[in-house]
């Protein structure tokens, strides 16, 4: 079942020109982008800075309005949704951001942060907020006894788990991860990726996973869209895009990824396997 | 060994904190030979950047150091700030992660490079300007004679990092300290900068201390590797040994955590 359809989305920003006689001009950040996300799958959107991947994610999350094009969620055109319609959409689509500390209110306890999406909807969870929070914390691998602590009392990886718990509070059908593991140390990153994949297996929702790191994308996604200068230059299954890239830019991107010397790596893993 | 360019011997750095002094670097030892790149790798809080700052005498106020840091046999630790100023940018220079915050937005890049040169080498403004243009050419900035009069914001991120490298190399240092120099760059630009650093090293023979959290980057640039964890040196050896036969559990864990792009098998 197709969960999300982004059709012909374009986003222009008005920029101030250079110099004293500055003339305003428009910059096209996203240029006629279309893609679909099936229920339960992970679509990664990968690209370098300025490729338009985050703008695309923000449009899909209805955090930005596109200049042209439509966003269809669950069969409903939500491009211009307001009021109750938008509230329903927000109940189904959640976002996890890159920097956990700037996306968590430092003055709120974990309990208040995690239940905030429910509070906005005027819902009180069954069994109370405390029990609800503690259950979610357990699901994302946090100590439930810490539900009255503040974000600053957690490490970066733990704070990102709080952000993930908040996204899951409304039981969404789609979670948009915008560089959600980019700021984390490699060992923590591996754990959070593992968590994201486990949660998807448990609950069957979809991810739109925005990232610049191709190796991370390869681990988590089933399908991959490669963006360059506002356009999707290539989209396909993970194995197609990584194993047999068609577009020149995709090939350049893949070739540029630094690799651990494959011979050394194979020797180490051979030894450790035996 | 006497032919070692740069020797760090039992370096310990202690920082004062509200809970008393903390050793952020503990008994770290390594050497960098001429022409050689030594990679220092670790996660955040491992002490890798503190090691670099200690070498240059740029530690925060109140920091204490012990051990020995020698360049060409001369002790650097404990030297006065004034003394070290003639070393920094001259015999040892540094390239940081974020070129935008290391460059002064009010001055042209040419002026900043020539200032650096004249501080250490003296000479006329026009001679220093020529040095700046040559330096920009060496790092392959197209149209260097015109670009020398541009301001930092007129360069892209990758080009800015090239400017930083040009500035770092204008006094022909014997040691270059690169602290996460490609971390803020896009992967295609990163590949270009790594290639540039390798090329410049082979032509100038500068020793390099390359600090990064990225093991794949280390693998492609360093001959020797020091792995650090919470201030401790956990493993030190040739790149081949560390990557193919790591002795320490932490190194193995780090290597296992790196997502691979070419693996056949995926879970």
Image: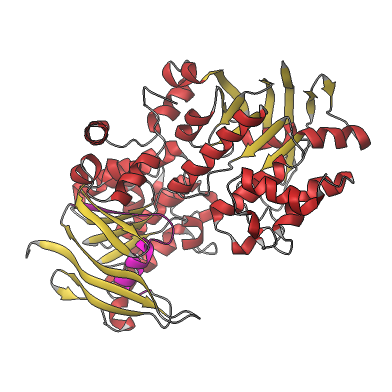
Position of residue B24 in the picture relative to residue A98 (left or right) = left
Q: Is residue B73 left or right of residue A189?
A: left
Residue at the far left in the pictured view: B2
Residue sitting farthest toward the front = A127
Q: Looking at the figure, which quarter contains the N terminus of chain B?
A: bottom left
Magenta span contains residue B106: no
User: Where residue A45 appears, x then y in whole percent?
Assistant: 59, 29
- Can residue A108 be seen in the rendering of this structure? yes
Q: Is residue A100 left or right of residue A246?
A: right
Most foreground residue, B106 or B53: B53
**Magenta stretch contains residue B39:** yes
x, y (%) of residue B211?
Answer: 34, 55
Determine whether B213 is above or below A11 in the image. below
x 60%, y 46%: residue: A98
Residue A65 in view: no
Rendered residue at 79%/26% (across/down): A68
Which is nearer the eye, A127 or B199?
A: A127
Which quadrant holds the C terminus of chain B? Answer: top left
Magenta extent: B36-58
A256 or B192: nearer the viewer: A256
Q: Which is nearer the eye, B110 or A176?
A: A176
Residue B222 location (% of width, % of height): 25, 47
């Amino acid at each position: 079942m197709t969960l999300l359809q982004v059709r012909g989305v374009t986003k222009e920003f008005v920029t101030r020109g250079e110099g004293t006689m500055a003339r305003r001009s428009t910059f096209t950040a996203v240029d006629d982008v279309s893609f679909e996300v099936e229920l339960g799958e992970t679509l990664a959107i990968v690209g370098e800075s300025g490729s338009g991947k985050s703008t695309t994610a923000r449009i899909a999350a209805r955090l930005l309005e596109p200049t042209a094009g439509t966003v269809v969620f669950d069969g409903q055109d939500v491009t211009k949704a307001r009021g109750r319609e938008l509230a329903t959409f927000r109940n189904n689509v959640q976002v996890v951001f890159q920097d956990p500390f700037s996306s968590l209110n430092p003055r709120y306890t974990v309990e208040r942060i995690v239940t905030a999406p429910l509070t906005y909807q005027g819902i009180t969870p069954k069994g109370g907020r405390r029990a609800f929070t503690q259950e979610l914390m357990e699901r994302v691998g946090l100590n439930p006894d810490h539900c009255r602590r503040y974000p600053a009392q957690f490490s970066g990886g733990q704070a990102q788990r709080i952000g993930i718990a908040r996204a899951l509070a409304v039981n969404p059908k789609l979670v948009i991860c915008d560089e959600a593991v980019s700021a984390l140390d490699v060992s923590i990153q591996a754990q959070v990726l593992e968590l994201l994949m486990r949660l998807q297996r448990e609950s069957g929702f979809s991810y739109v996973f925005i990232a610049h790191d191709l190796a991370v994308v390869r681990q988590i996604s089933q399908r991959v869209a490669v963006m360059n200068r506002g356009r999707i230059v290539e989209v396909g299954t993970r194995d197609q895009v990584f194993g047999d890239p068609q577009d020149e830019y995709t090939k350049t991107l893949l070739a540029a990824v630094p690799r651990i010397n494959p011979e050394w790596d194979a020797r180490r893993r051979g030894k450790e396997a035996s | 060994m006497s032919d070692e360019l740069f020797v760090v011997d039992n370096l310990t750095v202690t920082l004062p904190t509200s809970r008393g002094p903390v050793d952020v670097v503990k008994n770290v030892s390594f050497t960098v030979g001429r022409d050689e790149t030594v990679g220092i790798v670790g996660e955040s809080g491992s002490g890798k950047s503190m090691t670099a700052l200690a070498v240059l005498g740029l530690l925060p106020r109140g920091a204490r150091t012990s051990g020995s840091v020698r360049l060409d046999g001369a002790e650097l630790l404990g030297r006065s700030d004034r003394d070290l100023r003639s070393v920094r940018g001259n015999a040892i220079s540094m390239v940081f992660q974020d070129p935008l915050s290391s460059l002064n937005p009010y001055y042209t890049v040419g002026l900043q490079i020539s200032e650096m040169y004249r501080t250490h080498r003296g000479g006329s403004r026009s001679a220093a300007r020529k040095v700046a243009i040559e330096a920009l050419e060496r790092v392959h900035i197209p149209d260097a004679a015109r670009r020398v009069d541009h301001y930092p914001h007129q360069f892209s991120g990758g080009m800015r990092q090239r400017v930083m490298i040009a500035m770092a190399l204008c006094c022909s240092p014997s040691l270059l300290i690169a602290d996460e120099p490609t971390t803020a760059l896009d992967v295609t630009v990163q590949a270009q900068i790594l290639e540039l650093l390798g090329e410049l090293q082979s032509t100038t023979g500068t020793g390099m201390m390359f600090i990064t959290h990225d093991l794949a980057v280390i693998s492609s640039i360093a001959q020797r590797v020091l792995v650090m964890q919470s201030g401790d040196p956990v493993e030190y050896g040739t790149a081949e040994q560390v990557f193919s036969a790591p002795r320490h559990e932490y190194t193995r864990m780090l290597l296992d955590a790196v997502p691979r792009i070419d693996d056949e098998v995926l879970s």
